[in-house]
Amino acid sequence: MKVERVQAVEVPGLGNKIKEAREADKRSLTQICGLVGMSTANWYRIEQEKNESVPEETLRKIEAVLGVEFGVNFPSL
């Protein structure tokens, strides 16, 4: 049996915040994407907010690799 919980929170300007953090990092986009485990094309889609959403796990990986926190929190149930 499965128990599933799906929550979404709107984070205005998240793509731009990710872009600014990446540009402040001295590593190349290719290096950063390798550490996060995603393609550069997908990274650009996230920065440009072309994706409707980003999985929390992916966001947390981005935060860990860039050494930042974007302040994305989910309300308690």
Image (tube, rainbow, N blue to C red):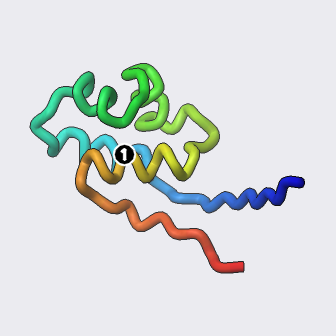
Check the picture and name the quadrant holding the C terminus: bottom right
Vertical side of 45 occupied by 65: above or below: below
**Looking at this rendering, what residue extends furthest in the right direction?**
1
Quarter placement of the N terminus: bottom right
Name the residue at 30% across, 34% down.
35
In the depicted view, which residue is nearer to us: 23 or 61? 61
Report whether 55 appears left or right of 37.
right
**Residue pushed farthest bottom?**
76
| Residue under numbered circle 1 | 62
Q: Secondary structure at mark 1?
A: helix
Q: Residue at x 31, y 27 (%)?
A: 34
Left or right, residue 22 beside residue 53: left
Q: Position of residue 23 (x, y in %)?
A: 19, 39
Q: Is residue 70 above or below residue 59?
A: below
Note whether 62 is above or below 35 in the view shown. below
Which residue appears at 55% of the width and 32% of the height?
A: 50
Front residue of this view, candidates 20 and 64: 64
- Residue 38 location, x and y as percent? 42, 27
Using the rendered view, name the quadrant where residue 36 is placed.
top left
**Circle 1 Cα neighbour tier, 10 Å, few/some/many (<14 / 14–19 / ≥20):** many
Left or right position of 22 against 60: left
The one of 1 and 13 positioned closer to us in this rendering? 1
The amino acid beneath tag 1 is Ile
